[in-house]
Image (tube, helix red, strand yellow):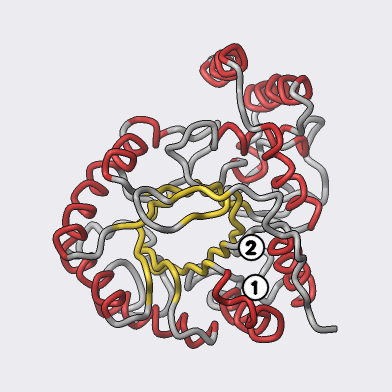
């Protein structure tokens, strides 16, 4: 059956300007980190992508190594793009990244010009695209000169293989240097993608202020702390949960008694707000204008519905913010 997008898809979503650029991103973006590789049924991935777009989620975030196995998320996305979304390509923001290990040998990792340019070429082939909207350097490289990495990003924009460039996982001072180099090259950085949630707040120690001052957008990944900031683990670890699956991204020993007690207290506040804990956690990351979008993963369409439903109540009172901070800052 030929996919026809929901004609009301833009009514429920909020679109926020990305820094000082001309680009707006949906407040909720969909990451294809998990659940879109060969380990997932293609039709499941297709259903998630269709449902996301029908809700006004226009930004699909990928990377060269997403899967599993690495590369398969881009390949599967490329197939679904051809079969379902080709008429809507110009309504989509499609991003990819390079910076983690992708192939064997010294040229398949980190931040050399050799690696970044080759990786983007491979990503474009897998997805069947002439260009991506955003291309990120996925993590800082301690050995390659920063100028080389930034020149590679500038190069792919000038080649027409990316419209914008971004950084991911860069600490504030390293980001400051990278932003200055890109500005001098004439390809300003559009966006930074850091890990940010109630349980991981390092970006508040300078990075968000830097990005705001420099006119750079930000998109937070892992805003639910790998599933910890949901009601999933309030009464133990379910057998079918990520924490029970052997996932490297959420291990049972992370769910300490202290952590679960904080989750329960946060859940109480969320219930008083008329929200699920996951919705409140997303709203909290979006509570100020320094964050452009939150990047969520999804394995069920209901999770997408919940995320977009959050937008109906994403404001916090001063009392709620103080109560949340007290819980997060408590030692026990």
Could you tell me residue 74's position as x and y percent? 56, 77
What is the quadrant of residue 29 in the picture? bottom right
Looking at the picture, tell me which residue is in the foreground, 77 or 22.
22
Residues 66 and 8: in front is 8
Picture coordinates of residue 81 (x, y %)? 64, 80
Q: Residues within 10 Å of mark 1 (few under 14, many from 20)?
A: many
Residue behind mark 1: 37
Q: Position of residue 263 (x, y in %)?
A: 68, 27
Whether residue 136 is situated above or below residue 317 in the rendered picture? below
Q: Position of residue 299 (x, y in %)?
A: 74, 58
- Residue 167's disc is none
Label 1 SS: loop
Asked if the residues shown at circle 1 and circle 2 are in contact, with their CB atoms under 8 angstroms apart, the answer is yes
* Residue matched to label 2: 34
In the depicted structure, whether residue 148 falls above or below residue 329: below
Depicted 16 relative to depicted 326: above or below: below
Q: Is residue 81 above or below residue 239?
A: below
Number of numbered discs overlaid on the protein picture: 2
Q: Quadrant of residue 100?
A: bottom left
Distance of label 1 from label 2 (alpha carbons) = 7 Å
Residue plotted at (76% across, 31% down): 275
């Amino acid at each position: 059956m030929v996919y026809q997008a929901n004609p009301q898809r833009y009514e429920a979503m909020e679109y926020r300007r990305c820094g000082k650029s001309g680009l707006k991103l949906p407040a909720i973006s969909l990451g294809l980190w998990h659940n879109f590789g060969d380990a997932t049924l293609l039709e499941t991935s297709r259903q998630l992508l269709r449902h996301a777009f029908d809700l006004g989620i226009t930004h699909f975030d990928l990377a060269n190594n997403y899967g599993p196995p690495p590369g398969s998320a881009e390949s599967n996305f490329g197939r679904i793009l051809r079969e379902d979304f080709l008429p809507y390509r110009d309504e989509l923001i499609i991003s990819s990244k390079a910076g983690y290990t992708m192939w064997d040998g010294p040229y398949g990792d980190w931040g050399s010009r050799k690696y970044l340019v080759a990786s983007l070429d491979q990503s474009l082939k897998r997805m069947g695209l002439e260009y991506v909207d955003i291309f990120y350097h996925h993590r800082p490289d301690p050995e390659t000169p920063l100028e080389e990495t930034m020149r590679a990003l500038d190069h792919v924009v000038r080649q027409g293989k990316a419209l914008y460039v971004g950084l991911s996982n860069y600490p504030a001072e390293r980001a400051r240097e990278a932003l200055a180099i890109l500005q001098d090259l004439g390809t300003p950085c559009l966006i930074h993608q850091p890990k940010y949630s109630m349980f991981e707040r390092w970006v508040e120690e300078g990075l968000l202020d830097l990005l705001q001052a420099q006119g750079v957008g930000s998109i937070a990944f892992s805003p639910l702390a790998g599933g910890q900031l949901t009601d999933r683990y309030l009464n133990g670890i379910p057998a079918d949960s990520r924490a029970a699956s052997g996932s490297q991204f959420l291990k049972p020993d992370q769910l300490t008694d202290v952590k679960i007690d904080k989750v329960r207290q946060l859940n109480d506040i969320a219930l008083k707000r008329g929200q699920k804990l996951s919705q409140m956690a997303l709203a909290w990351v979006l509570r100020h204008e320094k964050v452009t979008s939150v990047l969520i993963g999804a394995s069920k369409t209901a999770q997408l519905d919940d995320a977009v439903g959050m937008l109906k109540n994403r404001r916090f009172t001063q009392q709620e913010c103080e109560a949340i901070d007290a819980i997060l800052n408590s030692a026990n």
